[in-house]
Image (cartoon, rainbow, N blue to C red):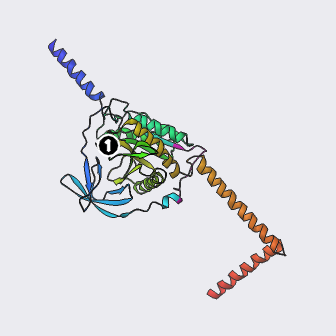
C-alpha cells in the first residue's frame, strides 16, 4: 500500500509540474556605452553585432560582454522621418486586410499579482485589447488563444505551429504579443494624455531570411508611434534569434511593458499602439488611408483633365494643335538622335 501511495504522489507531483507555468527567473542585463552610461536593460542574451535603437533614435551596436554587462558603441542617429512619408509596399487582398496575433509565452502577467500565472496569463487580455483596437480601425483580426506553456526554451517551438496556422490566412502582419521582465517600473512606464501607460519594445530577429524587411517594418512602426504618441516607444532590438520570424514578412514581436507594471497600463498601451500599426500599413490599414489614396488619385485625374482643357482653350488650333505638338516633339527627338550618331 505504501508503494502504491508513493507512486500516486509522484504522478501527482509530475502532473502538477507539467501543468503549471514555469516561474522563469530571467537574468537582466544592462547595455553600457563607452562612457559607462546605461543605455537600456534587457533579458535578451545578446551577441556582438546586435543593434539597439533607443527611444531618441540613437543607434548602438553590441561589441562584447564584460562583468555581466553588454558593452555597446554608438554608431549614429537613425532618421526615421522617411517612414512617415513612404508607405511600406504591401499588397492587400480584399477590403478588410487581416492581422494575426498570438502569444508564445502564455503565462506572462502583470502586477500586483504573480508575474507568471496558470494559463491564460494576463498577456492574453493585452492581446484582446490590441485586437479590438485594430478591428475598430478597419482590420480583420485573427487572434489565437493557444496555450504554449511552460515558459521555457522550447516555447517558440510550440508556438511555431500556431504562427504557421495563422499565416495560412495570409495576414499582412503577424504579431507575437509579450511583456518584458525588467524589474523597473519607471524604466518601462510613461505618461500619455494624462494616463500612465506601458512603453513598447519591438524585437526583430536577425537569424532568418526576413531580417532586413522585419527591421524596416520595426522602424516604420516606431516612426509612426513616435509621431502619434511621443514617449511610448522604449526602443527596437535587432538581435540574434529567430522568434519564428522566418515564417513570413512583417512577423514581429512586441513587448508591452514589464511585469512590475499593471495590466491596465499595458492594455492602454496596446490600444494606442494600434494607431501606429494602422499608420504603418497604409495600403490596407483602415478607411482613412484608403480614402486618402482614392482622393489623391481623383485629384491627379482632375488636374490632368483641367490641364488638357486649358491647353485646348488657349491654342487656336484646338485638337489639331495637340497633334501638331506631338509631331513637333517627335521631330525634335529624331533630330537629337541623329546628332548623337
From the viewer's perspective, tell me whether residue 111 is left or right of residue 97. left
Q: Label 1: which residue?
A: 185
Question: On screen, 248 above or below 300?
Answer: above
For the point 24% across and 39% down, the residue is: 25
Question: Magenta region: which residues?
Answer: 85-98
* Above or below, comparing residue 9 to residue 243 in the picture: above
Residue found at the very far front of the displayed protein: 194
Q: Nearer the viewer, residue 169 or 31?
A: 31
Quadrant containing the C terminus is bottom right
Q: Residue furthest top?
A: 1
Majority secondary structure in the magenta region: loop
Q: Quadrant of residue 164?
A: top left
Dot 1, how many residues are within 10 Å of its Cα: few (below 14), some (14-19), or many (20+)? some
Magenta-span inclusion, residue 34? no
State how many labels appear: 1
Q: Quadrant of the N terminus?
A: top left
Q: Position of residue 153 (x, y in %)?
A: 28, 41
- x, y (%) of residue 15? 27, 24
Residue depicted at 57% across the width and 52% down the height? 283
- Residue at image position (40%, 39%) is 265
Secondary structure, mark 1, is loop
Q: Nearer the viewer, residue 23 or 235?
A: 235
For the point 72% across and 65% down, the residue is 304
Q: Is residue 24 left or right of residue 299?
A: left
Of 229 and 21, the residue lying toward us = 229
**Can residue 341 be seen?**
no
Measured from the top left, where is residue 137 in percent x and y?
55, 43
Q: Is residue 301 visible?
A: yes
Q: Position of residue 243 (x, y in %)?
A: 36, 46
Amino acid at each position: 500500500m505504501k508503494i502504491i501511495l508513493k507512486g500516486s504522489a509522484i504522478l501527482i507531483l509530475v502532473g502538477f509540474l507539467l501543468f503549471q507555468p514555469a516561474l522563469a527567473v530571467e537574468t537582466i542585463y544592462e547595455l553600457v556605452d563607452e562612457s559607462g552610461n546605461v543605455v537600456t536593460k534587457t533579458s535578451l542574451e545578446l551577441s556582438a553585432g546586435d543593434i539597439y535603437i533607443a527611444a531618441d533614435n540613437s543607434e548602438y551596436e553590441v561589441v562584447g560582454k564584460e562583468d555581466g554587462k553588454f558593452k555597446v558603441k554608438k554608431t549614429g542617429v537613425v532618421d526615421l522621418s522617411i517612414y512617415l512619408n513612404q508607405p511600406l509596399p504591401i499588397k492587400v487582398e480584399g477590403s478588410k486586410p487581416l492581422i494575426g496575433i498570438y502569444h508564445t509565452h502564455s503565462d506572462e502577467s502583470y502586477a500586483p499579482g504573480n508575474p507568471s500565472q496558470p494559463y491564460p496569463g494576463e498577456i492574453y487580455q493585452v492581446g484582446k485589447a490590441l485586437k479590438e483596437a485594430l478591428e475598430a480601425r478597419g482590420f480583420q483580426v485573427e487572434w489565437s488563444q493557444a496555450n504554449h506553456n511552460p515558459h521555457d526554451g522550447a516555447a517558440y517551438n510550440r508556438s511555431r505551429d500556431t504562427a504557421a496556422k495563422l499565416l495560412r490566412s495570409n495576414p499582412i502582419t503577424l504579431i507575437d504579443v509579450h511583456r518584458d521582465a525588467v524589474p523597473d517600473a519607471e524604466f518601462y512606464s510613461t505618461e500619455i494624455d494624462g494616463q500612465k501607460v506601458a512603453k513598447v519594445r519591438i524585437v526583430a530577429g536577425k537569424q532568418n531570411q526576413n531580417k532586413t524587411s522585419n527591421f524596416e517594418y520595426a522602424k516604420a512602426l516606431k516612426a509612426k508611434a513616435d509621431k502619434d504618441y511621443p514617449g511610448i516607444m522604449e526602443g527596437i532590438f535587432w538581435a540574434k534569434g529567430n522568434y519564428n520570424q522566418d515564417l513570413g514578412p512583417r512577423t514581429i514581436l512586441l513587448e508591452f511593458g514589464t511585469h512590475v507594471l499593471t495590466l491596465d497600463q499595458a492594455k492602454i498601451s496596446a490600444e494606442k499602439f494600434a494607431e501606429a500599426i494602422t499608420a504603418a500599413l497604409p495600403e490596407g490599414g483602415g478607411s482613412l488611408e484608403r480614402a486618402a489614396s482614392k482622393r489623391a488619385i481623383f485629384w491627379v485625374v482632375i488636374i490632368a483633365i483641367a490641364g488638357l482643357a486649358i491647353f485646348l482653350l488657349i491654342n487656336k488650333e484646338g485638337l489639331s494643335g495637340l497633334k501638331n505638338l506631338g509631331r513637333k516633339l517627335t521631330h525634335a527627338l529624331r533630330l537629337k538622335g541623329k546628332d548623337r550618331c
